[in-house]
Amino acid sequence: MRLFPKFFILLAIQTHSVFADTAPWFPKNISADGDRIDNLVIFAFWVTGAFFAIVVLALVLFPLLYRSRPGHKAFYTHGTGLAERIITFALAATVFGIIDLNVIHRSNEDYDVLYGKQYDRSQCLRVEVQGRQFEWRVRYSNDNKTFGTPLDITTLNQLHIPVNRPVFVQVTSGDVIHSFYLPNLRIRQDAMPGLVTQVAFEAKEKGQYTLACSELCGLGHYRMKGYLTVEDQADFDKFLVDAAKDRDPDPANNWGWGWEER
Amino acid sequence: MSDHAHSEPTSFWTKYVFSLDHKVIGRQFLFYGLFFLLIGGIMAYLIRWQVANPWTPAPLFGMLLFPNSGGAATPEIYTTLITLHGTIMIFFAITPIAIGALGNYLIPLQIGARDMAFPVLNMLSFWLMPIAGTLLLMSYFGEQTASAGWTGYPPLSSATYTPGAGESLWALAVAILGTSSIMGGINYVTTCINLRAKGMTIWKLPLTVWGLFLTAVLNLAFVPVIAVGLIMLLFDRTFGTHFFTGVAINPAQAGQPLLYQHIFWAFGHPEVYILILPIWGVVSDVLSVFSRKPAFGYRLTALSMFVITCLSTVVWGHHMFISGMSPAMGKAFQSLTMLISIPSSIFFFNWLATLWRGNLKFTTPMLFAIGVIFVFAIGGLTGILLASRTMDIYFHGTYFVVAHFHYTMAMSVFLGSFCAIYFWFPKMFGRMMNETLGKIHFWFTFVSVNVVFLVMFRVGMAGLMRRVADPYAYEVFKPLQPLNQIITHGVMVLGTAQLLFIFNFFYSMFFGKKAEDNPWQAATLEWTVPSPPPHANFGEVLPVVINGPHEYGNPAVKGKDFLLQTEPAPDAT
C-alpha cells in the first residue's frame, strides 16, 4: 500500500515536467533565420490543432448524443446524395486550402532564405566539414577561398565561427552516411559519401553549442559529438592562428576538396 | 463440390499444419504475427529503457536477452535492438496480422468464395514466413548482429562497416518475407477479381476487402523493388559488387548510396499504405456495424483509398529532403505529398459522418475503431508538418518523426488489429471474447499509447535525435531525461495491459461463450455462415449477393435493423 502514494507523487512530478519549461520546447535559437522554422512549426501547430480540435469535439459529442438507448434509432443515410458529396469535397478543399497550401507556400518562401540565397558571398566564411566514424573534421582555408592545400587549418570536433557573419559549410563524409546537425541553428544536412552538400547560416549569439550527428552511423553514433563555438571576429582570428600552429604538413591527410561556389 | 479446388483434409498434418484452407492459413498468420508482436514489443521496452536510463540493467527482460552485460544494453545491443524492432514490427508482426491473417481469413468469406484462387501458393506464402523469421532470429544470436537500422542504409550496412553474418541474414530474411508477400499479393488480387460471388459487384464489396485488395496491388508492385534492393545489398556484402558502396574507397568505380535510399523509399512509402489500407477498411466497416447505419459515402471512401494508393507511389522523396537529393525534387515531392490530404480528409470526414446520428453501440471493436480515428488524426495532421521540406530540416531524424510514424502506421494498425481481432474472433474460433476484459484492455492501451507518443512529440520538438543510445552524452538534451522516463513508464503500462489481451484471447478460445452465427448483427457474407465456418465455407450453394455491405437501420425493414447482403430487400410499399 506504501507504493500507492509514491506512484501518485511520481505521476504528478512527471506530468508537471511535460508542461514545465525545465525541458525546452525548442532548443534556444541562435540563428538569424532559424525563427522562420520555429514560426512555421507554430503556425502549422495552430492550424492542424484547430482541425484536430474539431475531430476531438466530434469524437466526444457523437458518442454522448448518439449512444444506443431505448427508443433511439439511427438516421438512415448512405451519404451519397449530391449535397453530401458537395459538403465532403468542400471540407476536403478547406483542409487543403487552409493547412496544406499555406504550409507549402511558407515552406517554399523560407527554404531559399534558409539555404543562404540572400547572403553577400564576398562577406561569407567558408568551412569544409567531413564526417567520419565517429568525429567531425573541420577545415578552414588559408585565404577563405582555396581548400585542399597544405596551408589549410584543420580541427577535430571544434567548429568555430564568428558571430553575425554568414557562414557557408560544405559537408561530406569519409565513410558512412552521417548527418551534420546544429540544433541551435536549426541546421541539418546529411553528410553523404561521394557527394558535397552545402548549408548556410548566420549565428547571432555568442557561446558554445552542440554539433551532433543525427544519422545512425555505427556503434559510436551516440558519441559523435562536436562543439560549435560562436565568438567575436577577433577571437575567431586568434583561434585560426592558434589552430594553424598544429597544421598537419602530411599531404596524405589532406582530405579537403576544392571549394565549389554555388 | 465440384467448384472447390481441394477436398476436406483428414489427417492432422494436412488439416492444421500444411493446410490449404484459407481459414487455417489465416489463423496461422495471426498466431505468427502475435508471437512476433510480443517479441518486437519487448524490444521496444528495452530500447525505451536504454533511452530513459542509459546503460542501467533493464528489469525483467534485460537479464533474459543479454545476460553477458548484466542485463544492461551496450552500443552493440542497442543498435541491434532498434534494427530488429523496426524490422520485426513492420515485416513480421503487422504484415502477417493486418495482411496475412485478415486477408486470408476474410477475402474468401466476404466475397463469397470457397477458398483463395491458389491454395497451394497460399500455403507456401505462409511457410516462407517461419523460414524468414528463423533467419532473422538467428541473426540476433550470432557473433555479429544486424545493426544498421531497419532501413539498412549503405555504406553502413556494407560488409566494411557492419561485418559478419547478422546483417546478411537480416537482408535475406526480409527478401524471403517479401517473396511471401508477393505470393500473397498474387493470390489476393486474383481472388478478388475472379472469385466474387454472383451479384458481388465491386460496389458491393465490404471496405475491408477494398483495403486488402489495394494493399495487395501495392504489394505486387513494390515489394519486388525492396527485394531487388536487398539482393543488390547482399551482392555488395558477399560478392564484392559496388551497387551502393565504395565511394569512400574509390570514387571513380563507386556505387551510389543515394540510389539505395531511392529504392528503399520507393518501396518504403507505399509500405506505409500497404500496412494501413486494410485497417482503414476494417475501421470503416466496424464503425458502420456499431453505428447501425450505412458507411457514410461508401463509394467516396473506396475511391479516396484508391486515390491514396496511386498517390502513395509518387511521394517517397519526402523521406530524403536532407539527403543531398536535388532541392527541385524536394519541392515536387513536397507538393505531391500534400495532395494526400485531400483523399485523407474525405474518408476521415466519412468516418465521422458515419458516427453522426448513429445508434452507437460501444462494444470492444467499436472502442478500438474510434481509437483508430483519434490516433490517425494525430498521425495524419503531424504528417503535414513533416511533408514540408522546410520544417523537415529541423524535424528530420528526430523523435518527432518517430512519434509521427508510430501514430500513423504503428498505433493505428496496432489498435486497428485489435479492433479486427475482437470483431472476427467469434467467427474465427466460434467463441466470444470477454467484453469487460476487452474494454479494460482498450482503455489502458489507448491511454498509454497516447502518453508514450504525445510526449515523444515534445521530446522531438526539443531536437532529440532518434537512434542515439545515450542522449545525455549531449549537454543540451540532459533536461529531456524526465520526459523520456515518462515515455518509458507509458511503454511499461502499455506492455502490461497486453497481458489482459493475451489472457482473454487464449481463455476465450477454449472457454469463451459459444458464438452465434452473427453475434454483432452484421450484414456481410461471413456472418451468414456458422461460426466457425465449415470447410469450403458456404455449403452446397454459393451465396447470391443482393445488397451493399452496410444495410443497417433501413426503416423499410421490419423486425430487425439490418439486411444481410443475401437477403432480398423489402418491398418499397
Image (cartoon, rainbow, N blue to C red):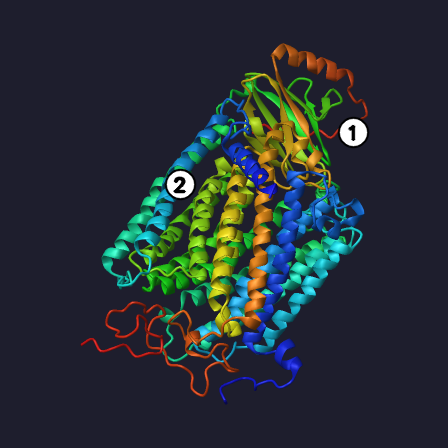
**Relative image position of residue B2 (x, y in whole percent):** 50, 89
Q: Are marks 2 and 1 on the same chain?
A: yes
Task: Determine which of the numbered discs, if any, sits on residue A253 in the image.
Answer: 1
Which one is closest to the eye, mark 2 or mark 1? 2
- Check the image and name the residue furthest to the top: A234
Image mark 2: chain:
A
With respect to residue A211, does B460 lie above or below? below
- Check the image and name the residue furthest to the front: A1
User: What residue lies at 28% left-to-right and 56% top-to-bottom?
Assistant: A85
- Tell me where residue A145 sits by quadrant: top right
Specify the amino acid type for callout 1: Asn
**Relative image position of residue B173 (x, y in whole percent):** 68, 60
Earlier-in-chain disc, 2 versus 1:
2
Spatial CA distance of label 2 from label 1 is 51 Å
**Relative image position of residue A157 (x, y in whole percent):** 70, 26
The C terminus of chain B appears in which quarter of the rendering? bottom left
| Element under disc 1 | helix
Q: Nearer the viewer, residue B373 or B321?
A: B373
Q: Which residue is mark 2?
A: A48
- The crowding category of the residue bearing disc 1, from other C-alpha atoms within 10 Å (few below 14, some 14 to 19, many at least 20), is few
Going by the image, does B188 lie left or right of B124?
Answer: left
User: What residue lies at 68% left-to-right and 30% top-to-bottom?
Assistant: A225
**Relative image position of residue B336 (x, y in whole percent):** 44, 47
